[in-house]
Image: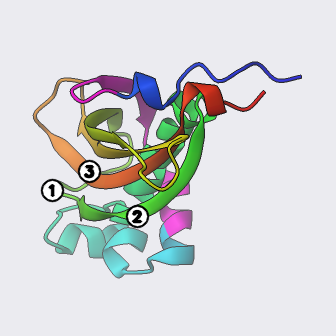
Amino acid sequence: MPDAPEIAFEDLTPGRVFDLGAVTVDHDEMVEFARRFDPQPFHLDEAAGKESIFGQLAASGWFTAGLWMRLYADGLLLRSTALGSPGGDEIAWPAPVFAGDRLFASLEILEARRSSSKPWMGLVTLRAWMRRGAADSEDVVYRGRFTGMFGSREHARP
């Protein structure tokens, strides 16, 4: 029998920040993702990357978002009463990402409210962050804002 989730809706209070860990961008994974999902030349070809606005081969923003999502799943979702997400209203890639970059992910709780139609569930507005170089770096490479749905502690899976 699996352990009860460590994190429930009640734990997701506005202002709380979760450190989700770090990842180093792998060149081959970055290019393979681009080949399959975002085949723009500056994501696939070293020469095209050098000639681009980025000055070198750059990761797809969607690849960067995927890296953040994996750290979010491992760092919080899989330990929580997560019930999914209806979506978000912001996604941004304010700086390019390159192979070898060390990226640090975090999650900030912006708002939390209990659902009026499903009182056993809470709706949480979340801010996704990914920074290059250090967890407290000003070099933000990914930012998002979305809603997560989380069960209350009494609704936690057994």
> How far apart in space, not on screen, are marks 3 and 2 (Cα)?
17 Å
Most distant residue in the left direction: 138
Mark sitting earlier along the chain (3/1)? 1
- The location of residue 85, given as percent across then percent down, is 48, 57
Query: Dot 3, how many residues are within 10 Å of its Cα: few (below 14), some (14-19), or many (20+)?
Result: many
Provide the residue designation for mark 2: 87
Decide if residue 50 is on the left or right side of residue 59: left
Residue type of the residue flagged with mark 2: Gly
Query: Closest to the observer: 143 or 99?
Result: 143
Whether residue 120 is situated above or below residue 44 in the rendered picture = above
Most distant residue in the right direction: 1
Residue type of the residue flagged with mark 3: Tyr
Mark sitting earlier along the chain (2/1)? 2
On whether residue 51 falls in the magenta region, the answer is no
- The location of residue 119, given as percent across then percent down, is 50, 44
Look at the image and give the residue range highlighted in magenta.
Answer: 13-33
Q: Nearer the viewer, mark 3 or mark 2?
A: 2
> How far apart in space, not on screen, are marks 2 and 1 (Cα)?
20 Å
Provide the residue designation for mark 1: 94
Name the residue rendered at 24%, 36% in the picture: 132
For the C terminus, the quadrant is top right
Name the residue rendered at 24%, 50% in the picture: 143
For the N terminus, the quadrant is top right
Residue 60 visible in this rendered orientation of the protein: no
Q: Nearer the viewer, mark 2 or mark 1?
A: 2
Most distant residue in the bottom direction: 40
Query: Dot 2, how many residues are within 10 Å of its Cα: few (below 14), some (14-19), or many (20+)?
Result: few
Provide the residue designation for mark 3: 142
How many numbered markers are drawn? 3
Name the residue rendered at 27%, 69% in the picture: 49
